Image: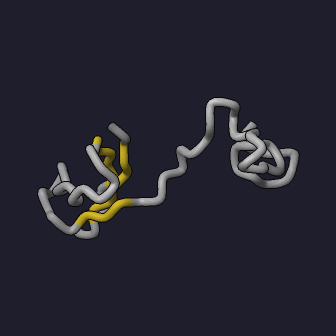
Amino acid sequence: MPMYEYACRACGHQFEKLAKTFDAAAPTCPKCESAETGRELSTFAVGADGGKSASMPVSGCGRCGGPNPCSMN
């Protein structure tokens, strides 16, 4: 099952949750129990080859896509 990132619109808490399908209902917030949660854009989208695949060109260091030298190295 894939892991999805969510954020609570009521309290701002960010959390992760396993979901069986992409269109699964958004979970309630584990901190305040609000149903006002939404899926966030995940920053974990790097492949096994470190993001250097032919289908996904990467500039710079490969972590942030910015120019070299990168502060993330």
Given residues 72 and 42, the one toward you in this image is 42
- Where is residue 54 shown, x and y percent of the image? 78, 44
- Where is residue 30 shown, x and y percent of the image? 18, 49
Compared to residue 55, the image places residue 49 above or below, namely: above
- Where is residue 62 shown, x and y percent of the image? 75, 43
| Side of 8 where 43 appears, left or right | right
Which corner quadrant holds the N terminus? top left
Compared to residue 58, the image places residue 35 above or below, namely: below
Which corner quadrant holds the C terminus? top right
Compared to residue 6, the image places residue 70 above or below, namely: above
Residue drawn at (32%, 48%) of the image: 15
- Where is residue 67 shown, x and y percent of the image? 85, 53
Name the residue at the left extreme. 33
Residue drawn at (23%, 59%) of the image: 26
Quadrant of the image occupied by residue 3: top left
Name the residue at the right extreme. 68
